[in-house]
Image (cartoon, grey):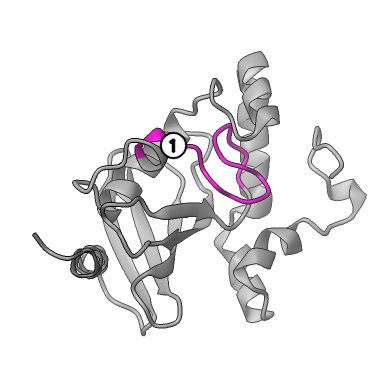
Amino acid sequence: MSSPSKRRDMDVMKFMERCQGAMQTPQYACSVWQGRMMSDYIVETINDGLSEFNVEFHGPKESPYEGGVWKVRVELPDAYPYKSPSIGFLNKIFHPNVDELSGSICLDVINQSWSPMFDLLNIFEVFLPQLLLYPNPADPLNGDAASLMLKDQQQYEQKVKEYCERYAKREKFENASLNGSSDEEISDNESTGSADDDIPGDADP
């Protein structure tokens, strides 16, 4: 049986090998089939290591999240794959199972029923697309999103699209990076507009 560190490195390299037309290190462009979508990933390593990196993730087609682009932070613990990775959205997303402030997700397959049989491809090809396609308002991290989804599906989908337009465009976090903003500041920088620009229905912090 391979050691956790060897398996971790193998999984990350397997994920990288799916990249087509690799860009200059530390970024790699890759395309993988994700059910209803062909998603172009950009993987950005952090501190030149394989245990922490950001992945550019595109919202699934035929969903309210279509057209949205998110930076997803991945942190692999020393005991990976026997311990699940830490996954979180860096820019804001309106979703019942994603905490709007921290970006952490509520997903049983990662938080509770993780198995060493799973790998990074499962996360980005299956688990995250399914999370966005099939939200679970019965187990929310964002109570407002869950309540709105149960109360008025049409208004919920409209608000999802408004968040996508405001927070989930590639140029948004590209501009933030050019301005020297950290990953943690991406969502904050995008939410500092005037009151007239606030999304209808948003509560004051």
Q: Is residue 94 above or below residue 7?
A: above
Residue 120: tell me if it is visible.
yes
Direction from residue 101 to residue 135 in the image, left or right = left
Per the image, the residue denoted by label 1 is 107
Residue drawn at point x = 24 percent, y = 70 percent: 9
Residue drawn at point x = 29 percent, y = 55 percent: 120
Residue 54 percent location from the top left of the image:
45, 66
Q: Is residue 154 above or below residue 186?
A: above
Q: Is residue 4 above or below residue 164?
A: below
From the image, give the main secondary structure of the stretch colored magenta: loop
Residue drawn at point x = 19 percent, y = 69 percent: 6
List the single residue furthest toward the top: 151
Residue 78 percent location from the top left of the image:
33, 65
Direction from residue 79 to residue 54 in the image, left or right = right
Q: As shown in the figure, which amino acid type bears the numbered disc 1? A: Leu
Q: Secondary structure at mark 1?
A: loop
Residue 18 percent location from the top left of the image:
22, 64
Direction from residue 84 to residue 199 in the image, left or right = right
Q: Quadrant of the N terminus?
A: bottom left
Magenta span of residues: 93-109
